[in-house]
Image: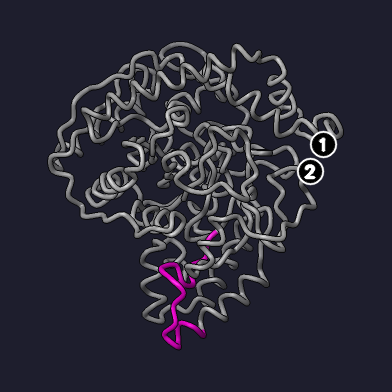
Amino acid sequence: MSELAFTSATELAARIAARTPSPRDLVDAYLDRIDAHDAKLKGFLTVCREQAVAEAGMAEKEARAGRLRGPLHGVPIGLKDLFATAGVRTTAGSRILGEWVPDRDAAVVARLKAAGAIVLGKLHMHEFAYGPEGRNAHHGDPWNPWDPRVHRIAGGSSSGSAVAVAAGLCAAALGSDTGGSIRLPSALCNLVGLKPTFGRLSTDGVVPLAWSLDHVGPMTRTAADAALLFGVMAGTPAPVLSGDIRGLRIGLLRPFFLERATPSVARAVESAASQFEALGAQVDEAAIEGVEHAAAAFLAIVWPEALAYHQRWMRSRPQDYDPTVRDRLRLGAFVSAVDHLNGQRFRQLLRARTEALLARYDLLLAPATPITASPLDQDEVVLAGERRDRRGALILYTQVFNLTGHPAVSVPCGFDPDGMPIGMQLVGRADDEGTVLRAADAYQRATDWHLRRP
């Protein structure tokens, strides 16, 4: 059963339809792995043991009778703990919502359940999704499973989602992405993480960080799995992944992106570009004018939007926040209306420039993050010879496409000298998740990075 724990969700669904293994056997296998490994890894905040076993038993009976609910029938998944779940506590990794038990499921969760997915539990996260490291002062810090000796960050804020899938504790997971919180932990833990086009997937029933930047999406082992879950959540057929990308035009983002990445990350993405050329794509160097100002615009938007949601608790329960999260929330009070509007104006300009570039290219290629997973207590990193705060460095490349709203996927493309995963980022035109995932899938058919295990 340990092999099945690392089998793709797509293949598991096919095997369940063929009645081997049974959903109950699969759920039991994942629960055993959670019992064996999660005390150290801290992927889960809540394990829905009894509920998952009961649902697996029902799914098994339905499968034997030839009644499959949908393309995820009997497949065990995990949910970042900001997706509302009927009858199961949803804490957003906080004390503030520590006892909140919703009476309904988030819209995307309802669709996954209707398609037959079994929820194993709620996954760890940075408190209220407000941090790219994935740390949590209330519930402990998740452990990146790629280094069993050194406690390294898993990336955030969807840290538990990345840890659980990478360590074989569930077949797939949901995350949310406001500045990179799906793509960053996916890159740092060797997963595929899809941020769809802004607004393509419903955020109804999802605890917000910043309404105009929030996205939700799948975190999986393969692009095919991401396509499967995306189709279910979008209520559309899954994108067709043919493996053929001949003639695809790809713009390799060197200025700002490759130029600031660590050497091992830059080499891995350059190698991926060569692989795309070998598969028949045309790769040329490209640039987004003014992208270096994206960080300032992002903060001018996210700080006041985050404070707007938390205003009531910041007045009544400030002591219940992690101090670092509380300090970030307070920053929202110092952003003027003029600063916020200028951030939004730059956002429109950045979107227009990215759209113009995507009129010439089918996809853009860049690193997902300039660094790999660093030790937990290492708060600074060196980029292009300069010392930088790790938090800002982690979201340097991903926040750009939260601002523009374009679909972007992180895909495993190598490892650094310490054996830590590297992810590249593929960005496509609005509402064209199909091309993004087709290129990611073609790359995975030609490489084996995603098949390696921690």
Residue of label 2: 95
Say which amino acid is labelled 2: Arg
State the residue at coordinates (39%, 61%): 8
**Distance between mark 1 and mark 2 Cα atoms:** 6 Å
State the residue at coordinates (49%, 72%): 74
Q: Which secondary structure, mark 2?
A: loop
Of residues 120 and 113, the one nearer the viewer is 113
Mark 1–mark 2 CB contact (< 8 Å):
yes
Of residues 43 and 60, the one nearer the viewer is 60
The outermost residue toward the right is 316
x, y percent for residue 126: 64, 39
For this view, does 243 lie left or right of residue 199? Answer: left
Residue of label 1: 320
Badge 2: few (under 14), some or many (20 or more) residues near its Cα, within 10 Å? some
Q: Main secondary structure of the magenta part?
A: loop
Instruction: Give the extent of the magenta segment.
Output: 61-77
